[in-house]
């Protein structure tokens, strides 16, 4: 039994990678229970490797990691991973219900004998993502947002305490994006699930995220969005001068080219590198 | 005991018994072949059997043994070659090409009996011995037992391999085991319906059934039903019309596939489902 107060993830000075080089090193962060953490960073910044490390699929090269108070491997039965929809073949004729049911006790051998328990678990998961109307529809006929909701339902069917969502907003139109973000926030609020949610655009989760883990330049920093999305922090992470513009409540992160403010930043980055 | 005219001869009984076993085991494994998009691997594994049987004849051992060894070895190499679909197609094609090259060499060197080669390529369902029938039954049963044991992780890993992997399902080991089971069925189906035509059992019924059903269990049931119709129809037709059974089986398989394709593309795939297909665009607006 995992206590409700047990942190979902405690990572200390974590380094990991699959190739010769580390994808990231020296990353420390904590995901509290029932929290929403946005995970941002460019392609290749180590977001996927971080997920794999937290799932116990890639061993850390340095540092320590604890998931739900135990090792990442042991915690797996309480953790669910929602992969990027574009990595899956979802153009299939199965009903939404059947797709969700495929994950129910999917790790156990044999066939499902407890059909009614399975049906209840699937019904509950479909209700939690508000997708009862998709239960009898074919996956091939559904939109990206509808498929994404079913992917999340599939992750919920085994009642996880922690969910990793890998770019769930990719290739969705804005209204479908809002719906998925609201759904992820609801999982935190009503089910007490800790959510780690990777996205390219911090603006999509600004209203709901409790904290932001920003990966760049082979490292990562955690804090509130206001703490992290600043000129200084992003410049230090990327190792080049970065500039954040706020316009009508939206954040725009851009490379800083020239200007006196930029020169100050270059000096500061050089100094901080020397100290590190 | 008296048999109906169709089953009066022992060879007809053997044909029906072996054909039934292959229809059930082959089409059930074929259901997952289609789901996992490994139709090319299924075709290639059946054809590797030709080289194995020809090589064994040349070496003077039981062709079935050579067939089995070649097919299983090819299954291991295919599984080890990787998961990426693009890489997979190329490596499967390479194995297929190499084995066919070997096969024709073996047939060339062993010129005593070219008919045996034709038998392997196109099958000889009416020439099944008692021992072969028993072997077919045992292998089919073993494959079905394994398939039952693998059912849940295989279904999960086939529909969402990454989520399954994250949950601790040994996805790579399951892929390997699945190809070995496919190889085992191919080894017994090749002498019956032939290397070139085993595809009729592995892919035709399952692909038709998957367009007409929305659940794995009903899909599997329909797959088996269609495969049994294929095989029984093929053998009966060969008895009454005196055409090769494999030709009838292949024609029925193509017919099922074509019917499935037509019903999907004509938009009336409500044959066994309840909801009418709508375009993804209509839903995008609703979402």
Image: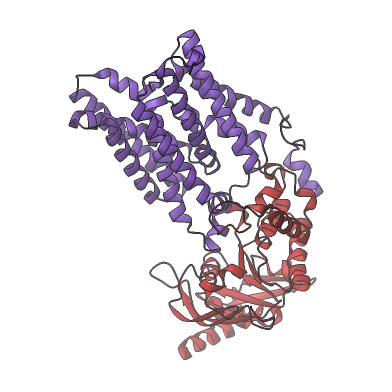
Q: Height in image: B179 above or below B165?
A: above
Residue at 48% across, 45% down: B145
Residue at 59% across, 38% down: B220
Q: Indicate the position of residue A17 as horizontal and vertical percent values.
A: 45, 70
Tell me if I can see residue A240 in this picture: no
In the image: residue B33, left or right of residue A125: left
Colour for chain B in the figure: purple
Q: Indicate the position of residue B155 as horizontal and vertical percent values.
A: 57, 49
Tell me if I can see residue A158 in this picture: yes
In the depicted view, which residue is nearer to us: B238 or B7?
Answer: B7
Q: Height in image: A226 above or below A158?
A: below
In the image: residue A98, left or right of residue B152: right
Q: Quadrant of residue B66?
A: top left
In the depicted view, which residue is nearer to us: B92 or A224?
Answer: B92
Q: Quadrant of residue B279?
A: top right
Q: Which chain is red?
A: A
Q: Height in image: A272 above or below A185?
A: below
């Amino acid at each position: 039994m995992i206590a409700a107060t047990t942190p979902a993830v405690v990572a200390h000075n974590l380094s990991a990678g699959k190739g010769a080089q580390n994808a990231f090193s020296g990353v420390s962060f904590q995901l509290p229970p029932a929290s929403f953490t946005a995970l941002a960073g460019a392609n290749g910044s180590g977001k996927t490797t971080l997920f794999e490390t937290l799932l116990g699929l890639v061993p850390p090269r340095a540092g320590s990691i604890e998931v739900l108070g135990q090792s990442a491997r042991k915690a797996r039965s309480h953790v669910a991973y929602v992969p990027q929809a574009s990595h899956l073949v979802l153009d299939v004729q199965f009903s939404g219900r059947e797709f969700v049911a495929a994950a129910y006790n999917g790790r156990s051998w044999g066939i499902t004998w407890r059909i009614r328990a399975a049906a209840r678990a699937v019904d509950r998961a479909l209700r939690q993502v508000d997708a009862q109307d998709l239960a009898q529809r074919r996956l091939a006929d559904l939109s990206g947002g509808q498929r994404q909701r079913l992917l999340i339902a599939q992750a919920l069917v085994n009642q996880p305490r922690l969910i990793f969502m890998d770019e769930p907003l990719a290739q969705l139109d804005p209204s479908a994006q809002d719906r998925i973000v609201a759904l992820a926030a609801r999982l935190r609020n009503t089910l007490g699930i800790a959510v780690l949610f990777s996205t390219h655009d911090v603006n999509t989760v600004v209203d709901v995220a409790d904290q932001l883990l920003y990966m760049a330049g082979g490292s990562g920093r955690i804090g509130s969005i206001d703490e992290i999305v600043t000129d200084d922090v992003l410049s230090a992470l990327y190792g080049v001068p970065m500039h954040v513009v706020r316009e009508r409540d939206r954040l725009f992160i851009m490379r800083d080219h020239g200007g006196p403010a930029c020169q100050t930043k270059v000096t500061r980055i050089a100094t901080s590198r020397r100290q590190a | 005991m008296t048999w109906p005219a169709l089953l009066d001869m022992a060879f007809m009984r053997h044909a029906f018994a072996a054909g039934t076993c292959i229809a059930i085991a082959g089409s059930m494994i074929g259901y997952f072949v289609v789901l996992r998009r490994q139709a090319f691997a299924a075709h290639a594994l059946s054809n590797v059997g030709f080289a194995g049987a020809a090589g064994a004849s040349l070496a003077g051992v039981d062709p079935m043994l050579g067939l089995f060894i070649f097919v299983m070895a090819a299954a291991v190499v295919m599984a080890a070659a990787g998961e990426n679909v693009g890489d997979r197609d190329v490596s499967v094609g390479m194995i297929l090409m190499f084995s066919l090259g070997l096969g024709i060499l073996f047939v060339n060197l062993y010129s005593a009996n070219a008919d045996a080669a034709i038998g392997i390529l196109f099958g000889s369902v009416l020439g099944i011995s008692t021992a072969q029938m028993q072997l077919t039954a045992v292998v089919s049963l073993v494959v079905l037992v394994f398939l039952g044991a693998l059912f849940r992780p295989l279904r999960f890993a086939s529909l969402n391999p990454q989520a399954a992997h994250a949950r601790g399902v040994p996805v790579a080991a399951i892929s390997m085991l699945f190809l070995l089971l496919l190889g085992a069925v191919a080894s017994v189906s090749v002498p019956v319906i032939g290397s070139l035509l085993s595809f009729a059992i592995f892919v035709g019924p399952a692909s038709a059934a998957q367009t007409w059903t929305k659940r794995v269990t009903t899909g599997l049931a329909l797959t088996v039903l269609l495969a049994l119709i294929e095989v029984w129809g093929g053998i009966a037709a060969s008895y009454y019309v005196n055409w090769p059974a494999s030709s009838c089986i292949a024609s029925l398989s193509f017919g099922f596939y074509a019917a499935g394709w037509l019903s999907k593309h004509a938009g009336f795939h409500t044959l066994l489902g309840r909801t009418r297909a709508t375009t993804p665009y209509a839903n995008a607006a609703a979402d």
